[in-house]
Image (cartoon, coloured by chain):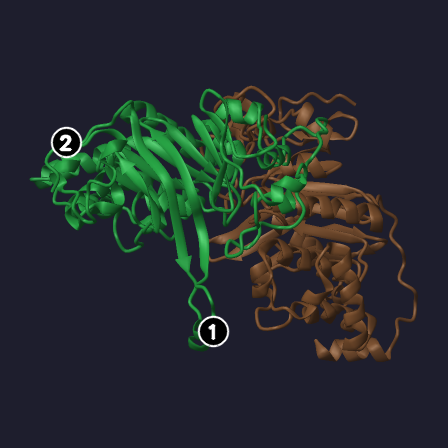
C-alpha cells in the first residue's frame, strides 16, 4: 500500500486519464456485489443500475437486508474484507471507480464523495474532540495545518447550525441531534460533489429528524449537492428525494421519480411496502404487513424473488426471472405482470 | 390493614405506607371502568453532587422526569404516551408498575394507592401489570429456551399446581402471541428466532400471567416495517380478545394514531394534550402537538404540507423554563406564557390541552 503510494507520488501519470462519457454525475451500471461466506457467496447486490444527476437526490429504499447499504458502500468501495464487486461499473465524473485502486479511491473518498453514517455515536471517535475529527479530512485532502483546518471547521459548524463554542466538545457532550449535525459537517468538510446519507435520521426523534432533513435539503440547495439517501422509511424518501429506487433481495424492483413510485406504484412489493406506512392525513386504518420473509441470498430462487410473498403471482413467476421493464418514461419495474409502456 | 373494601378516589390517605394488603387487592374492583387514576404524579431523580459542591449548594437539584401529571387509564383501552426522548413517557410507564418510586402524587390502581403497597401486595400486583421492553434482542435470556422464558413468571409466582398445567398455559400464551404451532417453538433458543418472533416471545411472557395491564415501551422501535405492523396488530387483537389494557409508549405519533384509543402527548415531564386519538390528531390544540403532527413524514410526494419545525432541542429537565415549559420553542408564544404555568383546558369530550391561549 505504502509502496504504491510513494510510487504514484513520485511518478505522476504520464498520459492523462481518459474521461469516460456517462449520464449524470454518478452512473452505476449493472453493479453486482457478493460477500464470501463459508456456505457460499451471498449475492447481496445483483445487477443494480441507477444514475444521479448533479444537484439531484436519489432515495434507495427497502427492508433490512435488501442490499441498499451494500450498493452504496460498493460505490465508495468501503466493503468489508469478504465483500467484492463482481461485475459492473461505477462511473463517477468521468472515472470508473469499480476499477480504481485503493490509493485511487482514497483521493475520491471525502474529497468527491462523502458519507453520513447511521449511528453518529458509533461513527465518531469518543476520545477525540469532535471539531478535530472534522478537521482530519481537511488536513489530509487540502494539506492545511490543524489551525487553519479548524477555521474551516468553525465555518462548517455555522453552516449546520451548531454553536462555534462546541468545536472542542467530545461527542458524548453533544446531544443526538447535534452529533448528527456534526456528522453532516464532517461529510461536507472537503466540498464533495456527492453525499451519501446512510439512514441519517433513523435513530432520531421525529422533531430532530425533521430538523436534520430540513438541514440536508437547505444544504443541497445552497451547495448544489447531489445526494443519495438510504432509508428503510419510505415516507422519508417521499418527502426528500426527487428519484427513488426500491430494492428487494439484492435487486432493483422499481425505480423512477418519487411521484412514479408513490402515486403509480406498479411492483406488488412497492405497493405493499407503501401500505405498511401509516398516512396520518388519510382515513385511519390498520396498516398492513408483508407476510413471509425475504429469500436466502446464498441460493436466490430461480424465479422472481418476491414470488412467495406476492398476492398477484402467476405460475410463471416461480420459474421465470423477470427483467426490468420500462412502464412509463423513466419508470422501471421488475415484474412479469408489468406491461412495457414505452 | 384496612377493613372496608376501598372504592374510588376517597381511599386516598387512609392507608399508611406499605399497608395495602393482598386481600385488599383481591377484593378491589374498578369504578366506572377506570383502571388507573393517576393524580399529580411526580418522579424526580436527585442529582449526585460532589462533597464540596453539596456543601456550597443552596438547594438540591433534581431531574424532573415526571412533573405533576394527572390522567386516567380506562379498562380495556390502548392509551398511547407520545413524546420525544426525555419527555418522561417511559418513567411514567415504569412508575405505574412501581419500577420507579414516585416522589409525589398518587397512582390509584382499582382505587388502591400503588405507592403504599406492601411488598407482598406488590408481588401480587405485578402479576396483574406487566411490561414489554423495547429491544427484544437484549430483554430475553439467550441461554433459556422459549419455554423457560415464558414459563418463568409462572414459576416465580408458583401459580401452576402441576407441570401439565404450566405447559398448557405456556403453549396457550405462545400461540396467542402468534407463534403457531406453539409446540415447534417451545424448545428453541432466542438466537434461532427473528426480531419479530422474539418480540412475540416477550409478549407471550407478559401475557402468560393474564395481566390486566401491559406497559409496552417502544415495542416496535427496533423492528423492520414489515414485522412492525404484525406486532401492532397483535396488541390490538389481545386488547379485543383478552381485554388487556395497554399503555403504548412511543415516539412515533403515527403509530400511536394507528392503534391507540386515546393519546397523551408529553413534553418535558408534563402531559400537554390528551384525548381521543382521532380527535387529537384531527383537531390538535396545543402548539406542540400541532408541530409534532406537521412533521410526520407521509408516503406521498405530491402532498406538500407546511412543516412546523421547532427550533432547538428539548431543554434540560433539571432547569425547567418558567411559566409554560414549552414557551422558549413555541411558535405561538406570547409574553404571558413566560409567567403562567398553564392549567388543563377542557376542549370537549375527553380532550384536554394545557395552553393559556386556548379559549
Residue A273: % across, % down? 56, 31
Residue lying farthest to the left in this orientation: B161
Q: Is residue B339 above or below residue B110?
A: below
Q: Are marks 2 and 1 on the same chain?
A: yes
Mark 2 highlights which residue? B5
SS for dot 1: helix
Q: Is residue A181 left or right of residue B222?
A: right
Q: Label 1 is found on which chain of the structure?
A: B
Residue B101: % across, % down? 32, 51
Residue at x-position 59% and y-position 57% = A175
Q: Label 2 is found on which chain of the structure?
A: B
Residue at x-position 28% and y-position 37% = B108
Residue lying farthest to the right in this orientation: A15
Which of pointers 2 and 1 lies earlier in the amino acid sequence?
2
Which class describes the residues within 10 Å of circle 1: few (<14), some (14-19), or many (20+)?
few
Mark 1 highlights which residue? B56
Kindly indicate the quadrant of the structure image that contains residue A152. Answer: bottom right
Please identify which colour was used for chain A in the image.
brown
Give me the chain that's green.
Answer: B
Q: Nearer the viewer, residue B16 or A235?
A: B16
Q: Nearer the viewer, residue B104 or B110?
A: B104
Q: Is residue A113 left or right of residue B115?
A: right
Q: Is residue A123 above or below residue B313?
A: below
Q: Nearer the viewer, residue B77 or A25?
A: B77
Cα distance in 3D space between marks 2 and 1? 50 Å
Q: Is residue B218 visible?
A: yes
* The N terminus of chain B, quarter of image: top left
Q: Is residue A288 visible?
A: no
Amino acid at each position: 500500500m505504502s509502496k504504491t503510494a510513494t510510487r504514484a507520488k513520485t511518478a505522476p501519470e504520464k498520459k492523462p486519464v481518459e474521461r469516460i462519457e456517462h449520464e449524470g454525475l454518478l452512473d452505476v451500471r449493472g453493479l453486482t456485489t457478493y460477500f464470501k461466506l463459508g456456505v457460499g457467496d451471498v449475492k447481496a447486490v445483483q445487477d443494480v443500475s441507477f444514475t444521479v444527476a448533479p444537484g439531484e437526490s436519489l432515495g434507495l429504499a427497502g427492508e433490512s437486508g435488501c442490499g441498499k447499504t451494500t450498493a452504496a458502500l460498493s460505490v465508495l468501495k468501503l466493503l468489508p474484507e469478504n465483500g467484492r464487486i463482481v461485475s459492473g461499473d461505477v462511473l463517477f465524473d468521468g472515472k470508473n471507480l469499480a476499477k480504481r485502486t485503493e490509493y485511487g479511491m482514497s483521493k475520491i473518498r471525502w474529497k468527491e464523495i462523502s458519507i453520513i453514517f447511521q449511528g453518529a455515536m458509533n461513527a465518531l471517535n469518543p476520545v477525540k474532540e469532535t471539531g478535530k475529527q472534522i478537521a482530519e479530512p481537511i488536513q489530509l485532502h487540502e494539506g492545511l495545518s490543524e489551525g487553519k483546518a479548524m477555521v474551516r471547521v468553525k465555518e462548517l459548524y455555522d453552516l449546520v447550525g451548531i454553536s462555534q463554542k462546541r468545536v472542542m466538545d467530545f461527542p458524548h457532550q453533544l446531544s443526538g441531534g447535534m452529533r448528527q449535525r456534526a456528522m453532516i459537517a464532517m461529510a461536507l468538510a472537503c466540498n464533495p460533489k456527492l453525499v451519501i446519507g446512510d439512514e441519517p435520521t433513523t435513530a432520531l426523534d421525529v422533531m430532530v429528524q425533521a430538523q436534520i432533513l430540513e438541514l440536508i435539503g437547505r444544504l443541497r440547495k445552497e451547495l448544489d449537492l447531489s445526494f443519495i439517501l438510504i432509508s428503510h422509511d419510505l415516507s422519508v424518501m417521499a418527502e426528500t428525494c426527487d428519484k427513488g429506487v426500491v430494492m428487494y433481495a439484492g435487486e432493483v424492483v422499481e425505480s423512477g421519480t418519487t411521484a412514479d413510485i408513490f402515486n403509480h406504484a406498479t411492483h406488488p412489493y412497492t405497493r405493499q411496502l407503501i401500505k405498511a406506512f401509516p398516512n396520518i392525513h388519510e382515513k385511519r386504518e390498520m396498516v398492513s404487513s408483508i407476510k413471509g420473509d425475504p429469500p436466502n441470498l446464498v441460493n436466490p430462487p430461480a424465479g422472481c424473488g418476491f414470488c412467495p410473498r406476492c398476492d398477484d403471482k402467476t405460475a410463471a413467476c416461480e420459474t421465470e426471472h423477470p427483467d426490468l421493464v420500462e412502464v412509463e418514461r423513466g419508470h422501471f419495474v421488475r415484474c412479469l405482470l408489468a406491461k412495457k409502456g414505452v | 390493614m384496612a377493613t372496608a373494601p376501598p372504592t374510588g378516589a376517597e381511599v386516598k390517605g387512609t392507608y399508611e405506607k406499605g399497608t395495602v394488603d393482598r386481600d385488599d387487592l383481591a377484593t378491589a374492583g374498578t369504578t366506572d371502568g377506570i383502571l388507573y387514576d393517576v393524580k399529580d404524579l411526580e418522579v424526580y431523580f436527585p442529582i449526585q453532587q460532589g462533597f464540596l459542591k453539596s456543601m456550597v449548594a443552596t438547594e438540591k437539584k433534581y431531574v424532573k422526569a415526571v412533573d405533576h401529571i394527572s390522567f386516567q387509564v380506562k379498562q380495556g383501552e390502548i392509551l398511547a404516551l407520545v413524546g420525544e426522548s426525555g419527555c418522561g413517557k417511559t418513567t411514567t410507564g415504569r412508575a405505574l408498575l412501581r419500577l420507579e418510586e414516585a416522589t409525589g402524587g398518587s397512582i390509584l390502581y382499582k382505587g388502591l394507592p400503588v405507592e403504599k403497597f406492601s411488598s407482598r401486595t406488590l408481588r401480587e400486583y405485578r402479576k396483574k401489570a406487566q411490561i414489554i421492553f423495547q429491544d427484544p434482542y437484549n430483554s430475553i435470556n439467550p441461554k433459556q429456551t422459549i419455554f423457560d422464558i415464558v414459563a418463568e413468571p409462572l414459576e416465580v409466582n408458583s401459580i401452576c399446581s402441576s407441570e401439565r398445567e404450566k405447559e398448557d398455559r405456556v403453549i396457550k400464551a405462545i400461540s396467542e402471541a402468534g407463534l403457531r404451532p406453539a409446540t415447534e417453538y417451545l424448545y428453541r433458543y432466542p438466537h434461532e428466532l427473528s426480531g419479530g418472533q422474539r418480540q412475540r416471545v416477550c409478549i407471550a411472557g407478559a401475557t402468560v400471567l393474564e395481566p390486566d395491564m401491559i406497559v409496552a415501551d417502544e415495542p416496535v422501535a427496533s423492528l423492520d416495517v414489515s414485522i412492525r405492523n404484525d406486532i401492532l396488530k397483535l396488541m390490538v387483537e389481545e386488547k379485543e380478545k383478552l381485554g388487556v389494557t395497554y399503555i403504548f409508549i412511543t415516539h412515533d405519533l403515527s403509530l400511536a394514531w394507528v392503534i391507540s384509543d386515546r393519546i397523551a402527548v408529553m413534553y418535558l415531564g408534563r402531559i400537554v394534550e390528551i384525548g381521543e386519538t382521532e380527535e387529537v390528531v384531527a383537531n390538535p390544540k396545543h402548539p406542540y402537538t400541532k408541530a409534532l403532527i406537521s412533521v410526520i413524514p407521509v408516503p406521498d410526494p405530491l402532498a406538500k404540507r407546511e412543516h412546523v419545525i421547532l427550533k432547538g432541542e428539548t431543554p434540560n429537565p433539571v432547569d425547567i423554563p418558567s411559566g409554560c415549559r414549552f414557551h422558549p420553542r413555541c411558535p405561538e408564544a406570547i409574553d404571558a406564557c413566560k409567567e403562567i404555568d398553564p392549567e388543563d383546558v377542557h376542549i370537549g369530550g375527553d380532550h384536554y390541552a394545557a395552553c393559556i391561549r386556548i379559549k
